[in-house]
Amino acid sequence: MKSSVVRGTRFRLFLAALLFQLTFASGHVFSFDEVAIADIAAGIVNEGKAELHFGPEMRLYYKPGPNGEQYSKFGIGMSAALIPFYMVGKIFGFLAGPAKARLIADIIASFANCFFVALIAPCFFTLLRLAGVPDRSARITTLLLLFCTTLSVYGRGLFNDALTALAVTLAVQMHLANRPAWSGAAVAIAFATRAEYALLAPSIAVILCISTPLMLSLSRHGGWRKLVRFFAPIIFMGLLLALYNYARFGSPTDQGTLTDNPHDVFSTPFHIGLFGLIASPGKGVLWYAAPVWLAIWGCVDLGRRNRLLLALFAVIIVPLLLLHAHWHSWMGGWSYGPRRLVALMPVIMIPAGFIVERLLTTSRGRTIVVTTAVVGFAAQLAGLTTNFMSYLQWAQDHKVSTLWSFEHSSMIGQLHWLFGTGWVDLWYTNLLGLSLPAGLIGFALTSATAVATIYSLASDAADSR
């Protein structure tokens, strides 16, 4: 396929994903996690400092440094990525007047994840093409990932999972493109955002060693150069983070992730956490992301076609899945679906491209793909249109039920909340209410998304010209 055609396809997928995210963006943050992430970005821009100014009620979201200042327990990656968005918002805020400057800056910054999720579209499409998935199947699988899994919900707000997912996708894509330095740089961004994604480094390095015969032999210096290029940006980022940690807490290894909260520990039995992440009625990925069923089915096809890619798939997912399953908050706190798996969703969906390729050859198979898309998108509707934090606050009497029952799960319970309260949580309804102007904006964005999606799917004819 010509490079110009590939670029056109990637742009169409990016545009469709961006319009989709802008249609369902909230224009605000949801939790104190996001408040802390945004406050660091604002502090760096406004004061040149990465300090927080929170009261005791926010104790779980910061850790005191030796100088008595408060510092976030989250990685610096997401806050750093927000800086350009916050600066643009600040410019618009100044135009609106000092009284609204910070509010407008925060609102514009809240759209950052719309762009990060949209950027996953061309990266994931390229990853599948490098893996040998045909063009049409790669495009359809990319849209399944972006529209029909919980990744779409996390384009709303400022959780750091979308940026981590983008970095993970880039790391695998660049590995398949035989560009180890860029793959290492993506790994560095991933663990600067979420510390546990440092596990990507040994996972990809193992596959690098396996895929280059006699890589460590003294007569094969090319293999050594690949490893050096891969680890160079990772080591560089590690040193930067060590200096950042030392400046905050007086220790290069103290990121502040674990506070003095006695519950902030690895305490969930593995079998409970694994079942919860995969199949629990309230948070299981099998119910919140229907295309994952295709990915499971596609593992056999992937194994037949590319055993090294299947091995990479396994060595990335298994360690992180076990780590998250053992964490006390295995589901990712108050969340829509299993938030701990959102950053892994592009990797999880790699095998789906291979089974989609086979299913598209028969009418029955095409029906399965369409049905999966409809069911998957329907599962995201509650998360895309309502404020899941408001529902979970209301449902605290059903705290156990929201994890272990379908009736009180976010996927179903939030729809009841929506019909009961009438509160549609979209940026244009929040600004304009349920009014005609808000409806027109929603209609325009929905129509533009539909046109861009159809265009990206129907690009076969355009590409053949």
Image (spheres, helix red, strand yellow):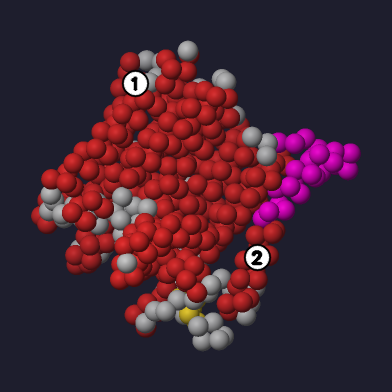
Q: Which mark is residue 366?
A: 1
Residue 172 in the figure: left or right of residue 10: right
Q: Which residue is mark 2?
A: 240
| Label 1 Cα crowd, 10 Å radius (few <14 / some 14-19 / many 20+) | some
Q: Quick one: 307 or 377, which is closer to the camera?
A: 377
Which residue appears farthest toward the right when viewing the image?
A: 219
Q: Secondary structure at mark 2?
A: helix
**Residue occupying image coordinates x 42% and y 15%:** 461
| Percent coordinates x, y for residue 440 in the rendering | 18, 41
Which residue appears farthest toward the top when viewing the image?
A: 465
Q: Which mark is residue 315?
A: none
Considering only vertical position in the picture, is 89 above or below 137? below
Residue 120 in the figure: left or right of residue 303: left
Residue 139 in the figure: left or right of residue 438: right
| Percent coordinates x, y for residue 62 in the rendering | 45, 76
Q: Amino acid at mark 1?
A: Arg
Regarding residue 250, the answer to whether it shows in the image is yes
Residue 445 image-quadrant placement: top left
| Percent coordinates x, y for residue 318 in the rendering | 53, 49
- Range shown magenta: 211-234
Q: Is residue 377 magenta?
A: no
Q: Quick one: 341 or 420, which is closer to the camera?
A: 420
Marked residue nearer the N-terminal end (2 or 1): 2
